[in-house]
Amino acid sequence: MIRVLLADDDALLRAGVAVVLGSAADITVVGEAADGVRAVELCRELAPDVVLMDVRMPGIDGIEATARIVAAGLAARVLVLTTFQNDDYVWRALRAGASGFLLKRASPERLIDAVRTVASGDTLLDPSVTRSLVEHFVVRGTAGPADPASADRARLDRLTSREVQVLRLIAEGLSNEQIAELLVIAESTAKTHVKRILQKIDARDRAQAVVLAYRAGLMNPGTR
């Protein structure tokens, strides 16, 4: 059973999400928080597997709450729900250690799949989040403390041709399952490729790998 904590200051939204997740036999909502401080407290008390984290909340926002959860070494993985009212939140949440991003307008089926994906230890990047991240931070040259492009390219030189191919697909927002289907390989093989890529380029997760791929010129903005 996947244990989920809901963190959002909108009680109506929490109620709706709880109903959606409650329809899945393998997911249970163990608690709700209306602010970031309470979200961190409940993470310690309830030990959820996944936290569905809103960004804008009273007290401390979802980004600071995510950073505290990660810094405390808690097992919970954070899935950020965003509306893109401020794209800076996407990058800040990424740096704080979020394990995934999903639009609040996502379908119920997509939300359930996202929770399962993050709970399994994978990182989820909604394709829309990937495109926004690239457009607003990589293309404009403000993707955090940027390494020189030559250094980024040197990190990609550690990859095999197959791993470069997989990294391109990651940068397009494809999941392990989609990568496996496209390359006609087992999903376990796709997961192995992704794991090795992250290790070789010293990226914490898929999101950092995407940033690196664009900064190093492996991907071109606006193309797929």
Image: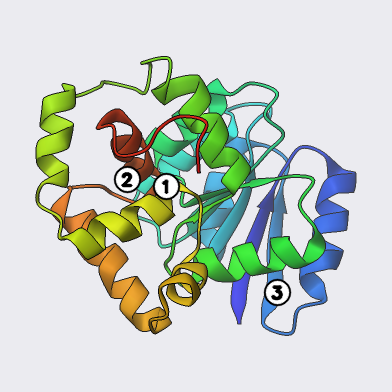
Q: Earlier in the sequence, mark 1 or mark 3?
A: 3
- Circles 1 and 2: CB distance less than 8 Å? yes
**Residue with the mark numbered 2:** 209
Q: Quadrant of the N terminus?
A: bottom right
Residue 166 in the image, given as x and y percentages of width and height: 33, 60
Looking at the picture, does residue 97 appear above or below residue 92? Answer: below
**Residue with the mark numbered 3:** 28
Residue 149 in the image, given as x and y percentages of width and height: 18, 24
Is residue 123 in view? Answer: yes
Q: State the image quarter where residue 48 is shown.
A: bottom right
Please give the name of the residue rendered at 16% of the width and 21% of the height, measured from the top-left corner. Answer: 148
Q: In the figure, is residue 7 to the left or right of 123? A: right
Q: In the figure, is residue 133 to the left or right of 67? A: right
Looking at the rendered image, the disc whose residue lies closer to the viewer, 3 or 2, is 2
**Residue with the mark numbered 1:** 171
Q: In the figure, is residue 18 to the left or right of 67? A: right
